[in-house]
Amino acid sequence: MQTTQILEIPKKEAFLRPYSKLQGKSSTSHKKGKETAIRQLNKQNKTNSKLNAGKTIYTHNTTTLNPNYQLGLKILPFESCLIHDKCEFFRYKNGENLLVRTIPKWVTILQMWKRDKETNEDVMCGLLETNELRASNYRKIKALDRFCNYYQLKYKAKTTTLLFLTFTRANYAKKEWKKMMNHITITFKKLGCPIQGFIWTSEISEEYGIHWHYHLCIAIDRVNWKKIPKTIKFEKIWGQRTEIDFVKKNVKHYMAKYFAKHNSRIEGSRSYGMSRIFK
């Protein structure tokens, strides 16, 4: 297994920037020459600790174009009224259709390494084939774990209400998803219960034809609604059927199956998203 050599970079004194280049403000600046070396050293230390614990480490070997990729592309029609403002969301449109990727475009081979306890040498023990869809699902599950681990505790403490929403037939909706999310955020703020955090996933189901829809989970301050207000059902704004319900017991039970069970993707569209800050 290749190791990274860390070179010691000599310290440099802080230097004074010219007054004219700082628009009237002078300050000292330190170069960050050591940052790359420190990151590499930290990565190597983590790798060594995993190998010493008997775990397998994966390194990149090759990435090639899947020859069957074009065969897996399917056409999904969409409402022409969604074409506006030259939105990048539709830059992959084919006439008045969207392309659905059902087969991975890239195939990656990873090398598997383990440390021999007797010789203390790193030995390649095999190869693993993966693709960008599996990697995407892995990142989605990690994001879901982060969201659930944070808000499940607040839910149990009865300080947070969690809502689960579904937006159907996205290709026939009145709004593109980014603008729909902006509208949702503003609506909850007007209701007096601003969103603490959210996570969503785009799903392509093929059980009864290609069906593109979104699942969204929202965390807000604890509310005691007997009925869900009509203003947050969003059916008129979305233009298609929507569903909304309170999350009961465990939020991960609601979201996990939607984050990992499907591998299809809309070309040029994100498959999941999450708020940057949890409140």
Image (cartoon, rainbow, N blue to C red):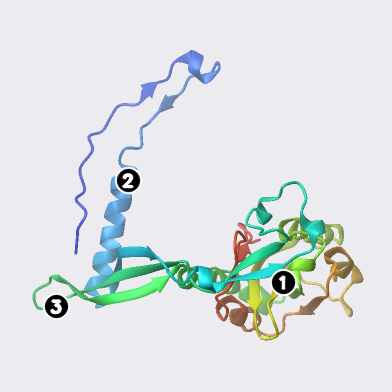
User: Mark 1 or mark 2: which comes first in sequence?
Assistant: 2
Pinpoint residue 146: horizontal percent, then vertical percent: 55, 69
Query: Are the residues flagged by discs 3 and 2 in contact, CB closer than 8 Å?
Result: no
Instruction: Tell whether 25 sits left or right of 16.
Output: right
Q: Which residue lies under the disc numbered 3?
A: 117
Give the quadrant of the C terminus.
bottom right
Pinpoint residue 118: horizontal percent, then vertical percent: 9, 78
Q: Which mark is residue 36?
A: 2
Q: Which residue lies under the disc numbered 1?
A: 160
Q: Identity of the amino acid at label 1?
A: Thr
Instruction: Tell whether 234 sits left or right of 157.
Output: right
Q: Nearer the viewer, mark 1 or mark 2?
A: 2
Query: Are the residues flagged by discs 1 and 3 in contact, CB closer than 8 Å?
Result: no
Label 2 SS: helix
Instruction: Tell whether 79 sits left or right of 219.
Output: right
* CA distance separating discs 1 and 3: 49 Å
Q: Nearer the viewer, residue 256 or 208?
A: 208
Extreme residue toward the top, this view? 20
